Amino acid sequence: YDEDSVSLIDLRTVGGTPEEQEAEFENIFKVQNSLPLITSKAFCGELRTSHIRSVYWKVFFGLCSSADWSSIQSSRSRYDVLIEKHTIDPHKLEAQDVNVFNPLSQNTSNPWTQFFQNTELNKLITQDLERLYPEHAFFRKDDVQAYMQRILFVWARENEETSYRQGMHELLAPIVLVLYRDARDASLNATNDVQKTLSLLFDKKYLEHDAFMLFERLMKKMKEFFLIVNTPKKAKNDPEEDPTVKTPIHQICHRIQSLLLNYQDPELCKHLKELNIEPQIYGLRWIRLLFGREFHIEDAMVIWDGIFADSGAYDDETFNLDLVEHIAINMLIYIRQQLLVDDYSHVLRRLMKYPPVEDPHVFVERALESRKNPYKKSNSTPEHTTTNSTLEKKLVVSEKKTTPSVFPLSKASSSTLHNHHSGSASALFSSFKDNIKDGLNNIGNHTPSVKKISKPKKTVNHTQLVQEADNNYIAKELKMAKALNSIISELTPMGYETEKFNPDTLLMSIARLKLVRDALEFQFVFEDVLGTHSVPPTKEEEAQQPTAQTVTITNSDG
């Protein structure tokens, strides 16, 4: 996949050739008890390149096992029954009592009432599916949308106490993708036992059935994180919050930041508490979506491999997802240096937009290690950090994936900042603030250096520098406002007079609007987006700027 492309990215939709699938299946499941082996492969991140990943997930969730692959058929039959149960069309029902059986009746037994409720539910699901991973063409496919629509609808009808909540479609998406990759036409001739088994497990006709069963199994634990509790108003003489009204998702968020993080990194825990960073602000999304928005979908599935392998979901008594909270802890510790030096807004921005990580499965390894002794300080805290740290080696931020910084960095300076700031936009903002204090002029166009940050100048008038920084920002904002006025002036005539419509002007205006947007989002240094189509300058402006203005865009690649 191409992360630098601005067009739709089509994910890999084929898991491997039939020969590759058969060879891997025979090699892995030739032993009688293969569960420890595939669990180890999941913990090591080796399932990323697997041609039969869906088989591993089905085994982890207990849908089938090497002892009896055919047991999956009973689950598939059940899904057919559920679809028939919840598919209601009053138009096809025989006429009954007109006082009850009519669209205007409020009777609870009226099939029309359920029909209207189903219609509203489907409308809500469709709305979310249309926005799902807009950058990936795979999720725009008609068959994929239809699969997910029915699965989410049937699950919601079967679990009315929770029903459908926004975010559930993002848990289903990777499951459908994995099954879609491995699916094959079962009508092909199978000449040996391995081919017959894979034809059964990968039967394209039952892709939707298997996706529902995996999703249902996952939601057995995840649905409690989507519960919403209406908190009653506290009495005026009761200053304490009633802990009994907290939902499970709030409890696990509190446990992550206030308990586990306090054990492993008390300094970071104290800092977040002093900034009044509530754990549910970032934890709700991290936990509910199993880190699906923090990483690319391919990387998120590597983390899911470890979570599913550790979950014990093949047995209700052993089913748990407690590894999730330890993964979250290690994600916080990994960006601790950025969090410790930033203020509230920048800390929040970093937590809500996690930096790209080269090898995210290391979070699974670290989580397994920290769970063994949750009361031991993490090896990545200052007291235990070394230059040869395993975590530091494996969790390398990819400069290619990182959003271009607000500073105009050359390739050389980008490399320097990579080591000092882990390539994050948040750390660059921190460096920006330090530069003001260190007396660096021209802050909007200067590349910060580690040397100057580590040796601040003590004779600088800080107040004056901060004021200059504010003035620079005001000037940039005025320049952006002028650019917007120019664009509005170009687009307005086209809106009122069709003969003045000019496609080239429209496209140029859209491009310049995007530049303004990127500047506001701090994706590059804003110099000028007026371009060659700007409104004529005033005489005063001509006197101040005798030379022609040009568009200058500088990013982390130089």
Image (spheres, helix red, strand yellow):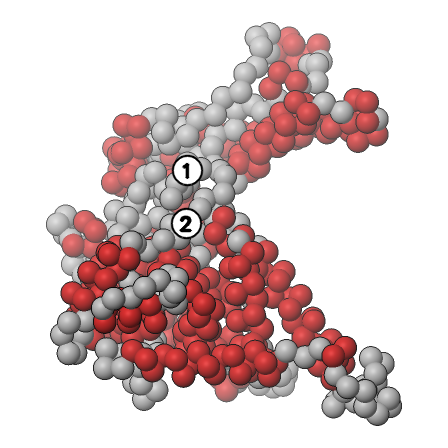
Q: Answer left or right for 538 relative to 74.
A: right
Q: Nearer the viewer, residue 204 or 475?
A: 204
Q: Residue at x 56, y 23 (%)?
A: 528
**Residue 436 in sight from this viewpoint:** no
Quadrant for the C terminus in the image: top left
- Any mark on residue 11, and which? 2
In the drawing, what numbered circle is on residue 271?
none
Q: Nearer the viewer, residue 311 or 18?
A: 18
Q: Quadrant of the N terminus?
A: top left
Residue ID for mark 1: 4
Residue 41 x %, y %:
20, 64
First of labels 1, 2 by sequence position = 1
Between residues 80 and 473, which one lies in front from this camera angle? 80
State the image quarter where residue 157 is shown: bottom right
Residue at position x 84%, y 30% in the image: 496
Looking at the image, residue 245 lies above or below residue 58: below
Locate residue 32: give its quadrant: bottom left
Question: Which secondary structure lies at badge 1?
Answer: loop
* 423 displayed left or right of 130: left
Q: CA distance from mark 1 to mark 2?
A: 14 Å
Q: Give how far across and how far down residue 26 sits, in percent.
A: 18, 66
Q: Nearer the viewer, residue 374 or 210?
A: 210
